[in-house]
Image (cartoon, rainbow, N blue to C red):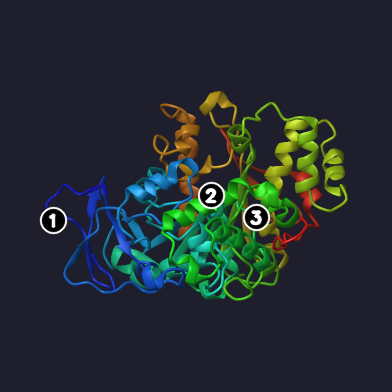
């Protein structure tokens, strides 16, 4: 593990949690505490169980190194990163505070990272909370939660949505302990991107999370939520890769990295299950939150339309070109064929019997195959789930603020546009580190710094006061904040897509069909 502290222990910041005292470090004027346990390690008898509070310790615990991440899928080498970090204390969190101590009463921002519910760890450099905390006058918290089969596999003997339950446990820790770090437990904002945005949406719908946060920021909400039957079918295929049954009794005998590898194998070959797994298979998404009727009673869109979390202030949005990065990774940038575009429209457009494809061709009559392909994927997976979350909130009489990031990423010669993940370095202000920072380009340009400063100011203002600085979204004017070289408030610019998807309910994905 990387050790960050270098100053004498007598001058380093300390805080007392319910489980014991911790000693962190000071970095650029901010007190930092890393690797603080918020739950017991979910291994041994606790593997595949709901999280349990961390045990107390004696003395002062060193909190200068990130805790080991949970077992990971192999995307972007995350499995190797996880294996290199020794230990099984997967459920830890990190705190950045510009003013530690019980009397500061600062707003708190709790980050939930993305990673398709398959990868993700709070130790990535792009999630360093120092600049956001220092410039915004907020306490920033990041944490690990179980992903893949450990966190979202649906099998006999284990509660559903263990990864979401980990998130609730982290928020309960914040409620009970953040005052000691300078935070106000009555002013907690959850914010997350991609699967983290989907997690924020799920938390809004979860009775167990009620009262743990008063504001929510959902960035590029991943719109996939599974039915129990679909989730169990995929978990069964993963267990079969190992010659086992999908039960805790069988799977608890398998080393975590082998279980992650089995998930990767199924994810890579999901196309052969397309007839049964539908859109999840066509997009190779093996894990998502499960609408199990208990931990997650209904989908977030249904929950918000029914009035859930109406008193929680909501900020939600997406990037303009969500799909572009994935198209580039697949080697299809500028190479999408008419057949590939038609397949994407048929699979991911709303409605059946080709109705979605017809709507897109009518709504975008001059679009070529590349644009249609990207529109279908972007709208289904990220853009319309995000917008419809705001519309569900307003339909129930609540308040939501909507944004769209339209500034094109300068990295890779500008080919990626305003792609998925571009908002992460801008919101954290980490423009020169981590994987998303590659989108910004070398030596961040002044316009990138200015846009990042604007977004950080808006996010922290929302955390402090519940108002990011532009009008709430409504079904009349549909005003949204556009983030570009010159930010502006205007009518929602993706009107054609909005009309195509306006009747779609975003139900839980079923075991069969689309």
Find out whether the residues at labels 3 and 1 contact each other: C-beta distance under 8 Å: no
Residue 9 is labelled as 1
> Looking at the picture, does residue 281 appear above or below residue 205?
above
Mark 3 lies on residue: 223
The 10 Å Cα crowd at callout 1, few under 14, some 14 to 19, many 20 or more, is few
In the rendered image, residue 276, in percent from the top left (x then y), is placed at: 73, 57
Q: In this image, 451 relative to 273: left or right?
A: left
Residue at left offset 23%, top offset 48%: 3
Find out whether the residues at labels 3 and 2 contact each other: C-beta distance under 8 Å: no
The 10 Å Cα crowd at callout 3, few under 14, some 14 to 19, many 20 or more, is many
Mark 2 lies on residue: 264
The 10 Å Cα crowd at callout 2, few under 14, some 14 to 19, many 20 or more, is many
Tag in front: 3 or 1: 3
Viewport quadrant of the C terminus = bottom right
Residue at left offset 70%, top offset 43%: 377
Q: Earlier in the sequence, mark 3 or mark 1?
A: 1
Count of numbered labels shown in the rendering: 3
Residue at left offset 36%, top offset 45%: 131
- Quadrant of the image occupied by residue 512: bottom right
């Amino acid at each position: 593990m990387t050790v960050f502290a270098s100053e004498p222990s007598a001058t380093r910041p300390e805080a007392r949690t319910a489980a014991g005292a911790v000693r962190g470090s000071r970095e650029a004027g901010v007190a930092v505490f890393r690797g603080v346990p918020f739950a017991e390690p979910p291994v041994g008898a606790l593997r595949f169980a709901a999280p349990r509070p961390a045990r107390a310790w004696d003395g002062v615990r060193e909190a200068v190194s990130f805790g080991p991440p949970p077992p990971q899928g192999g995307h972007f080498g995350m499995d190797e990163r996880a294996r290199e970090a020794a230990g099984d204390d997967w459920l830890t969190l990190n705190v950045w505070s510009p003013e530690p101590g019980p009397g500061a009463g600062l707003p708190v921002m709790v980050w939930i990272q993305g990673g398709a519910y398959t990868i993700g760890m709070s130790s990535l450099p792009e999630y360093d909370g120092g600049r956001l905390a220092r410039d915004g006058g907020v306490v920033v918290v990041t944490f690990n939660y179980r992903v893949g089969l450990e966190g979202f596999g649906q099998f006999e003997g284990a509660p559903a949505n263990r990864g979401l339950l980990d998130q609730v446990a982290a928020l309960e820790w914040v409620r009970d302990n953040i005052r000691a770090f300078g935070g106000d437990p009555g002013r907690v904002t959850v914010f997350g991107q991609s699967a983290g945005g989907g997690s924020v949406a799920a938390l809004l719908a979860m009775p167990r999370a009620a009262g743990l946060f008063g504001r929510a920021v959902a960035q590029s909400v991943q719109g996939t939520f599974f039915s129990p039957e679909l989730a169990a079918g995929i978990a069964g295929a993963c267990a079969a890769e190992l010659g086992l049954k999908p039960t805790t009794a069988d799977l608890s005998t398998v080393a975590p990295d082998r279980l992650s590898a089995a998930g990767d194998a199924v994810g890579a070959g999901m196309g052969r299950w397309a007839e049964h797994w539908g859109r999840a298979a066509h997009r190779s998404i093996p894990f998502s939150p499960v609408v199990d009727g208990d931990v997650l009673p209904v989908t977030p869109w249904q929950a918000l339309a029914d009035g859930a979390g109406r008193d929680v202030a909501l900020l939600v949005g997406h990037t303009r070109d969500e799909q572009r990065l994935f198209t580039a990774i697949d080697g299809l940038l500028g190479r999408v064929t008419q057949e590939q575009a038609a397949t994407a429209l048929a699979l991911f457009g709303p409605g059946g019997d080709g109705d979605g494809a017809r709507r897109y061709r009518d709504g975008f009559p001059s679009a070529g195959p590349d644009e249609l392909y990207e529109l279908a994927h972007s709208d289904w997976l990220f853009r319309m789930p995000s917008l419809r979350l705001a519309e569900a909130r307003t339909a129930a009489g609540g308040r939501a603020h909507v944004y769209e990031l339209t500034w094109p990423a300068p990295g890779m010669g500008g080919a990626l546009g305003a792609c998925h993940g571009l908002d992460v370095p801008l919101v954290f202000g980490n423009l020169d580190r981590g994987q998303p920072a590659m989108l910004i380009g070398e030596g961040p340009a002044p316009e990138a710094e200015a846009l990042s400063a604007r977004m950080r100011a808006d996010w922290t203002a929302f955390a402090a006061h519940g108002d990011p600085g532009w009008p709430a979204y409504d079904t009349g004017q549909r005003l949204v904040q556009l983030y570009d070289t010159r930010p502006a408030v205007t009518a929602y610019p993706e009107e054609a897509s909005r009309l195509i998807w306006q009747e779609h309910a975003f139900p839980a994905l079923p075991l069969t069909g689309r």
